[in-house]
Each structure stands twice: as C-alpha cells, then as structure tokens.
Amino acid sequence: MRFILFLGIVLLNISSAQAEPAFATGQEFKDCEACPRMITLAPGSFIMGDDTAYKYERPAHEVRIDYPFALGKYEITFDEWEACAQELGCKAAPDDHGWGKGRYPIINVTYKDIGDYLSWISKKTGKTYRLPSEAEWEYGARAGTTTAYWWGDKPGKNNANCRKCGSKWSGLGSAPVGSFKPNPWGFHDMNGNAWEWVADCWSPHHAMAPTDGSPRMDGNCQTPVMRGGSWYYFPKLSRSAYRYKNHEQVFSYNITFRVLRELR
C-alpha cells in the first residue's frame, strides 16, 4: 500500500513537471532556421524606472513578473526580415541607408510593418510572438542590475553604440547585431544601436503603470513607446530606464524592434 502511494506521488510529480516546465534564465533556442535566437527569462521582480532622472522615468516602482517568457537575443535583422518577405508575410526589405543588410538591425519599418512580421512568425511556428511590454523589455535590459547601464553608471567606451560612446559606429550608423558585449543574461544591444519599439501606449510618467509586466494601454496609443536609445543619440538616452515615443506611422534609420515569445 505504501509502495502504491509512493508510486502515485512520484507519477503525480512527474506529470506536474511535464505540464508546467520550468524555464531558467539564459536558455537559448530557435523555433525554426529563419527564426530569431531567443533567450528564456524566469519569473522575477525588479525596480523599474529612475527617480533621479527624467520625469518620464518616474516614479521608480517594483514590477513582479510571475511568468516565464523568451526575448530575442538580438534586434531583428535584415536577414530575418527577408525570410518573412520571401514568404510574402512582410513587405520587401526596406532601405538600409547604405550600411548593409544581413546581420544589421532592420530599420525603416513602421509599427504596422512590425505587426505583419509578428503575425507571420507566429503562424509559421505555431507560437505567440509579440512585442515586449516596457516592463518585460526593461527586465531583460537590466538583467538583474540596478545601475544606469548594465555595466555601470557611466557609459564608458565601446560598451554600446551611441553618440560619443567610443566605437567606430558611434554617431554614424547602426552596427551589426552582437557587435558589443552581451548583458549578464545574454542580450545584446539593448542599450544603444537602434531604438526598439515596445507594446505600450505612451504615458509621460510611470504613475499608475501596471506592476505585473503587462503593457500600459491607457495612454496615447498612436505614439507607442520606444526603448534603448540609438547610435544617433547621446548615451544618457541609452540608459536602461530611459523611455520615449514616436508616432506609429514613423519609419526611421534608427528605429528597430526585438521580439518576445510567450512560454505560457
């Protein structure tokens, strides 16, 4: 009887483990050959925003994310966009501003264009791909750190692609993804290189913002939030907490995106 009870408990535990897989931070995967490389993030909490900086970043507040998810290791590249275009899921690859395509981050795409890519890759893989919320993005960008940038409070030299940041691309153009060191969780270029669209509607502060990782949808949804700064802007705009906006119809040589894949 005791053996049967023990066996039942073991089988129940195995069944539960199979039903609810545990995702540790840092596991890498790709859902298909042409798909972006993803990194898993375990549930956790962090302080979002910065009370010592711009009013847009205030108030600093705790966010608790109680679900795992995966975030793109890199910004979406021209190669990845062209895979979508070849299957008629996206428009043809846009102008690269003479910098090159391949492993460079996709630029000159609108918010709607990005929606087309997300629909295509979700259908292709049978998984849910979307833009990250501001909170999900900052969780990945900070990677457990509390400093202005993941490497410290000063921009330093050659840590990221931003104006006067000491690299050969600074103030000149975007760099191929992965040209700079990754943060502690393995993500590249979340500080600098190109602005990254996220899912939130713009609000000029964090007051009453969601604290569960979900996107804020009560602001101006014609001007979504952008994160991360870019090669064109000074380093203070590439801090992990900095946030700004742009119109959803804008396309630019310094705006790109990074994808999130749901794991629940």
Image: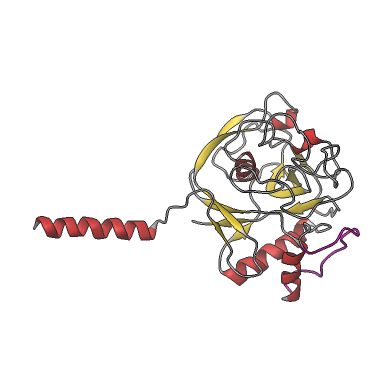
* Bounds of the magenta segment: 88-102
Q: What residue do we see at 63% from left, 70% from top?
A: 33
Asked if residue 211 shows in the view, the reply is yes
Above-or-below relation of 132 to 154: below
Residue 43 located left or right of residue 137: left
Q: Quadrant of residue 143?
A: top right
Q: What residue do we see at 72% from left, 76% from top?
A: 87
In reply to whether residue 89 is colored magenta, the answer given is yes
Residue at the far top in the pictured view: 52
Q: In this view of the protein, which residue sits in the foreground, 1 or 62? A: 1
Query: Residue 91, image x and y in percent?
Result: 79, 69
Query: Residue 70, image x and y in percent?
Result: 57, 54
Query: Residue 123, image x and y in percent?
Result: 61, 70
Q: Main secondary structure of the magenta part?
A: loop
In reply to whether residue 27 is colored magenta, the answer given is no
Of the 4 image quadrants, the one containing the N terminus is bottom left
Above-or-below relation of 146 to 246: above
Asked if residue 64 shows in the view, the reply is no
Residue 92 located left or right of residue 52: right
Residue at the far left in the pictured view: 1
Q: Quadrant of residue 7?
A: bottom left
